[in-house]
Amino acid sequence: FRSLLADKNSVVVERAEYMLGRFGASSRAFVPALVSGAARTQPVPAVYADAIVQIGGPAVPELLRQLEKVSAASLTREHWAVKLVEGIGIAALPELAKALGSPVASIRLAALGAISELGADARESRAAIAKLTSDPEPAIRGAALTALVALHLDAADTRARIDAAMKDPAPVVRLSAAMAAGTLGPAGRELSGSLGRLLDDSDPAVRSAAVKAVGATGSD
């Protein structure tokens, strides 16, 4: 298959990629070649994306490695590697759980985003996610709050962490905290005092999110 992936005929290459995807996790040895090909061609051709997603969990570490040179502050969920990781779904969870402890901020951030999409299926990762609410990187602190809410576990602890985050010096964290409170709905009513303070926040995005959260939680 390696020679087929390097073939000058695009039809041959696409057929090889299709077959590797059909083999699923058994094609793990070809993940670096597939991911390298995807990185060279933007937007990622469907045949590359489909093959990588079908290989599943074994493709996650190589995809996350594509983020090592991307700053956490500039990383978005529109990055092609992030979208493919999220496309793998629950099969990505074991590798995502490991990635929460990565020394690379952008990888921790991507893992949090993908875990948020998995919701309650990722509940066993709660302790690691909660730890990241104190991460040195503001974007990660904010993303950790979003992930905690998505797990639907230990509402009291989640509310306490959101409440603390509303006092964070970084606007992006306060914004995430307000949005997380809103996502809790009526369960976040106990945060009304802190939300009220955010209505006077120096950042307009935070103020706007606080207004929405007040309505969503039913706070007075």
Image (cartoon, rainbow, N blue to C red):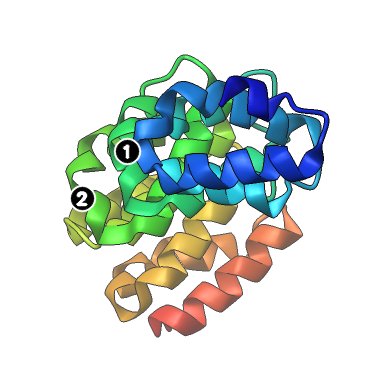
Q: Is residue 142 visible?
A: no
| Identity, as a three-letter code, of the amino acid under mark 1 | Ile
Q: Is residue 35 above or below residue 191?
A: above
Q: Earlier in the sequence, mark 2 or mark 1?
A: 2
Identity of the residue drawn at 36% across and 65% down: 191
| Identity, as a three-letter code, of the amino acid under mark 2 | Arg
Q: Which circle marks residue 123 in the picture?
A: 2
Callout 1: SS: helix
Judge left or right: residue 96 versus residue 36: left
Identity of the residue drawn at 33% across and 70% down: 188
Badge 2 local density, few (<14 within 10 Å), some, or many (20+)? some
Q: Is residue 128 visible?
A: yes
Q: Observer-nearest residue: 96 or 47?
A: 47
Quarter where residue 207 is shown: bottom right
Judge left or right: residue 21 versus residue 49: left
Specify the quadrant that holds the C terminus. Answer: bottom left
Q: Is residue 26 above or below residue 119?
A: above
Q: Mark 2 or mark 1, which is nearer to you?
A: 2
Quarter where residue 190 is shown: bottom left
Q: Position of residue 110 (x, y in %)?
A: 52, 38
Callout 2: SS: helix
Specify the quadrant that holds the N terminus. Answer: top right
Q: Label 2 vs label 1: CA separation?
A: 10 Å
Q: Which circle marks residue 129 in the picture?
A: 1
Q: Position of residue 64 (x, y in %)?
A: 53, 28
